[in-house]
Image (spheres, rainbow, N blue to C red):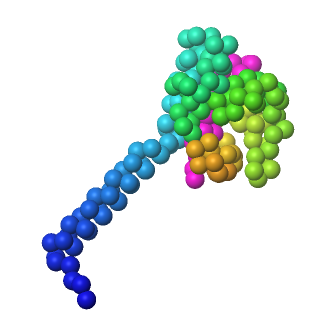
Amino acid sequence: MHKRSPSKLRGIVSAFAAGALLAATLSSASAITADDTKAFVDKAVAHIKAVGTDKALADFTANDNEFHQGELYMFCFAPDGMAKAHGGNAKLVGQNMINFRDADGFLSTAALIKVAMDNGSGWTDIKWPNPVSKKVEKKGVYSVKVDNDLVCASGYYKG
């Protein structure tokens, strides 16, 4: 039977612990929170006011800028459900999604538009494909009424 010396065993345990700590740190550092999502949407609304609606919507749909960061991206709708921008899937722009149902059959687009139009802003929980994990996951969506013609939103995946 092969015995390891206590110093080698301590070294192996220390290396394992350091690796676990690093993995936990990287994992928690990349986890997007509700606060991160709200700040992201607030930044997008400020962008609309700075550059105008048309330019901002084009920016939100593009996937090579600050408004598309991994699983965090912007999407915007007219109050009738017409997609005006979608950083997760540009093919959805121009489609009416008011009757779109998420993976659980919930009228997700209608709900997030209603929350924003009725309250100015708010949260809606849906199930949506995560572009990073490629799995349908729970997603908390923060939506904001930009004006009477536009609601913009983003969401974070809850796993």
Mark yes or no: residue 86 visible: yes
135 left or right of 95 in image: left
Mark yes or no: residue 118 visible: no
In this view, the residue in front, 117 or 107, is 107
**Residue 155 highlighted magenta (yes or no):** yes
Residue at horizontal 53 percent and vertical 24 percent from the top: 65
Q: Tell me which secondary structure the magenta stretch mostly adopts.
A: strand
Is 85 situated above or below 9? above
Q: Residue 124, position in %: x, y?
A: 67, 42
Find residue 62 and report its image quarter. Answer: top right
In this view, the residue in front, 122 or 18, is 18
Is 125 situated above or below 5? above
Q: Residue furthest top?
A: 51
- Span colored in magenta: 140-159
Q: Residue furthest bottom?
A: 1
Q: Residue 118, position in %: x, y?
A: 72, 31
Is 6 situated above or below 101? below
In this view, the residue in front, 88 or 74, is 88
Residue at horizontal 84 percent and vertical 38 percent from the top: 99
Residue at horizontal 53 percent and vertical 30 percent from the top: 40
11 left or right of 70 in image: left
Q: Residue furthest front?
A: 1
Find residue 93 and report its image quarter. Answer: top right
Residue at horizontal 20 percent and vertical 66 percent from the top: 11
